[in-house]
Amino acid sequence: MSVVGLERVVYGVEDLVLARRFFAEWGLWPEGDLLRAGDGTGVELRAKDDPALPAAVEPGSTVREIVWGVENRAALDGLAARLEGKTTLRRGSGGGIAFTDPAGFGVALAETERRPLAAVEIAVNTPERRARLDRVGAFYRQAAPRRLGHVVLQVPDIAAVEGFYCDVLGFRVSDRYPGRGVFLRGRAEADHHQLFLLQSADGAAHFHHLAFEVHDVHEVFGGGLAFAKRGWETHIGPGRHVISSCYFWYFRSPCGGSVEYFADMDSLTDAWQPREMPQSPEWFAEWALADGIRQYGGVQQ
């Protein structure tokens, strides 16, 4: 009875044309109102004033619903039973269930439809092992995200929201900034985090960012360079996180918050022991470029 991971994130936006262009250039492929990554996960774009959307936690373009995929119908029914009496349940499309979490975000659970990804060899040469012989390394002219990885939310009462996701929905704690943030995953064997909750500074809920996984660090760089060349603004990156070990590059999104390319995140099992560490620049990133990389004619400036 566990959450597999993010299925899709639904935005309510002020400019649908701009929003679709942003995610198409990000590397997702369009399918009606959906734009999908390689495994079928992705984003759904709706007009901000669409009456079918859950209420917004903040003004302007922002995330309106976060859809989590579960393993099967039995898991969905089990989670629905646990949610009874704790929140108001609504039936979603495709037999899923929808509700509002303690921070006010619209949330839905549905049987996962994500497709398995074919394994791709990423051959790397090291001083001790030559895995790539008589062939050049991979170069990326743009990113093609493989899957939706995690979402980050700023919430007014982190303990209440953490309790809801862990005690009711079965999420597990991976690591923690005491009193400031908590990294959660939907089941024991999963990415280091699929949901990161941050304590809001102003007492209100805010959407922070959405993250898509790509093949490797070279695709983070190649995809980020291509996206920046199209005129989209870097939020921060590229860089490498200390917690989770992954490489990242964040861009500001016209849909609200930011969107991130990431690669090489830690993968955890039931043996992992959560850590507590201070929320500080040293724990945020081993290294990071604040304004991205500008490239003209193949020469860094």
Image: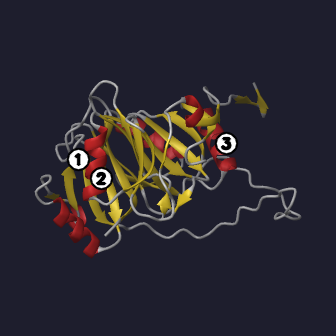
Q: Residue at x 41, y 34 (%)?
A: 257
Residue type at mark 2 is Tyr
Q: Is the residue 106 above or below the residue 119 in the image?
A: above
Residue where numbered disc 1 is placed = 101
Q: Answer few, some or many: residues within 10 Å of disc 3's Cα (few below 14, many 20 plus, some between 14 and 19).
A: many
In the image shown, does 159 or 69 lie closer to the viewer? Answer: 159
For the residue carrying disc 2, how many other residues have a C-alpha within 10 Å: few (<14), some (14-19), or many (20+)? Answer: some
Which of the two discs, 2 and 1, labels the residue nearer the N terminus? 1
Q: Which residue is mark 2?
A: 165
**Residue at point 14%, 52% (across, down):** 87
Q: Is residue 196 above or below residue 188?
A: above
Q: Quadrant of the N terminus?
A: bottom left
Report the mark closest to the observer, 3 or 1.
1
Above or below: residue 117 compared with residue 49: below
Percent from the top left, x then y, of residue 13?
32, 37
Q: Residue at x 19, y 63 (%)?
A: 82
Q: Position of residue 25 (x, y in %)?
A: 53, 43
Q: Residues within 10 Å of mark 1 (few under 14, many from 20)?
A: some
Dot in front, 2 or 1: 2
- Gap in Å between the C-alphas at discs 2 and 3? 33 Å
First reached walking from the N terminus: tag 3 or tag 1: 1
The reply to whether discs 2 and 1 touch (Cβ–Cβ < 8 Å) is yes
Q: Position of residue 272 (x, y in %)?
A: 51, 59
Q: How many marks?
A: 3
In the picture of the structure, the residue carrying the numbered disc 3 is 221
- Residue in the image at 79% along x and 55% along y: 137
The three-letter amino acid code for the residue at tag 3 is: Phe
SS at mark 2 in the image:
helix
Distance between mark 2 and mark 1 Cα atoms: 8 Å
Left or right of 244, for residue 109:
left
